[in-house]
Image (cartoon, helix red, strand yellow):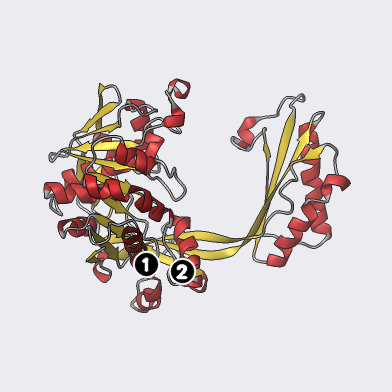
Amino acid sequence: MIRIANGSAFWGDSSEAPLQLLRGGPLDYLTLDYLAEITMSILQKLRARDPRAGFAHDFLGVIKRGAKDIVELGVKVVTNAGGINPQACADAVSAVLQATGYGGRLKIGVVTGDDILPRLGEFLDRGIELKNLDTGEPLTKIWSQVQSANVYFGAFPIAEALCRGAAIVITGRCNDAALALGPMIKEFNWKADDWDLLSAGTVAGHIIECGAQCTGGNCQADWESIPDMAGIGYPIIEAEADGTFVVTKHAGTGGRVDVPSVTEQLLYEIGDPRCYVTPDGIADFTTIQLAQQGPDRVHVSEIKGRAATDSYKVSISYSAGFKAVGTLVYAWPDAYKKAKAADRILRERFDRLGLKFDAIHSDFVGVNATHGNMAGEPSPDIAEVGLRIAVRGNDKNAVDRFSKELIPIALNGPPAVTGLGQGRPKVEEIVAYWPALIPKDVVAPQVEVRSA
């Protein structure tokens, strides 16, 4: 049995969680997930300004504060913090280990090859259209606007790095569940066609990839009874070679691990539950069996899988114009009526000024921002309503003018408005997402293992 914990669900998750996991009880592996589709484009911009950037710097803080624990406890760390620049991330980790007195004590594995931005022209010339999975349109439609393009690799490159002695494995873009599946492949010697076992490891990785979301955080089921959310524990998988595992957390931490909390996470970000496609295989979520084994222990078993496809998914981001979002809060009496009037007045002013946008979107916080038209009409006695209005378009000057026209309505529109402390809304570039597929035989991961 091996223990695999996940201490980060996204770039910006709790900086204390990895330390809590390292110091709270026995572990074999600590995984840290930092990447989302939008994160890749942000990192691409950072690297464009500085060739040493392009990775999740939060990871350096984990290494700085946790180096003693990682080295002395023998916990191996697997992370996708490498982002757009895994080599630079590894260099920075080496520097931190040297500065903390642990230089030369560990080997670092680096998985690269996922960044195919420089090769897009080559692929298009070869007839690989990289069609949008949602619309069917070829990439040529937005090629000049592309900012990043990364392949979702699987778990076997991670396992290779671990087999070659790496104590810290840094990847770029990979399947989220691969961070946990890689250690299982290494420790249990699972093969590339062990479809049921690989699917079980994928399900385990999926359950813990969002951190405390499976230990009671963001959990709808009886959420008020979840204990000590302020000290919530992050998840641990106790994995067996036969593909069964237990979801748990360190003793003495807050939150709760039960069948409802694990079930909610299983349903997070999936489509057809019979066909959860990853680079390493296809997991059938309808075969999963959950059983409460005791307090904060859920046993997972009987998972079935099918053969992997011949394609990798590619995450492509591209520039899609500009946006600005502003909020005005109107107070009782007639709060909703005032907010609706302000929305109407602003739109009329935009028309009179000749401002053209691809879209204007308004919602009324406190009334329909969550449920839209299904919310119905609010009580006339509602105390306050926030008008949140956003515009987007390719004309940056028009979006900037929207920002300048919003604030004046505080004095030249309906009364009793507040919430203006942030000033004019910031004009931001829109980064859109283009999902595509690429044949597995035209790209390949590279694995390097080096001394820290």
Q: Nearer the viewer, residue 435 or 381?
A: 381
Which residue type carries mark 2?
A: Arg
Q: Residue at x 75, y 27 (%)?
A: 383
Residue 170 to residue 144: above or below? above
Q: Quadrant of the N terminus?
A: top left
Between marks 1 and 2 in the image, the one whose residue lies nearer the viewer: 1
Which numbered disc, 1 or 2, marks the residue that appears first in the sequence?
2
Q: Position of residue 96 (x, y in %)?
A: 36, 59
Q: Quadrant of residue 131?
A: bottom left
Q: Where is residue 387 in the image (x, y as percent from the top left)?
A: 72, 41
Q: In which quarter of the image is the C terminus?
A: bottom left
Identify the disc placed on residue 47: 2
Residue 84 to residue 237: above or below? below
User: In the rendered image, which residue does mark 1 sit on?
Assistant: 88
Q: Position of residue 63 (x, y in %)?
A: 35, 52
Q: At numbered mark 1, what does the secondary structure look like: helix, strand or loop?
A: helix
Identify the disc placed on residue 452: none
Q: Residues within 10 Å of mark 1 (few under 14, many from 20)?
A: some
Q: In which quarter of the image is residue 336?
A: top right
Q: Do the residues labelled 1 and 2 touch (CB within 8 Å)?
A: yes
Q: Nearer the viewer, residue 330 or 4?
A: 4
Q: Can residue 229 be seen in this view?
A: yes
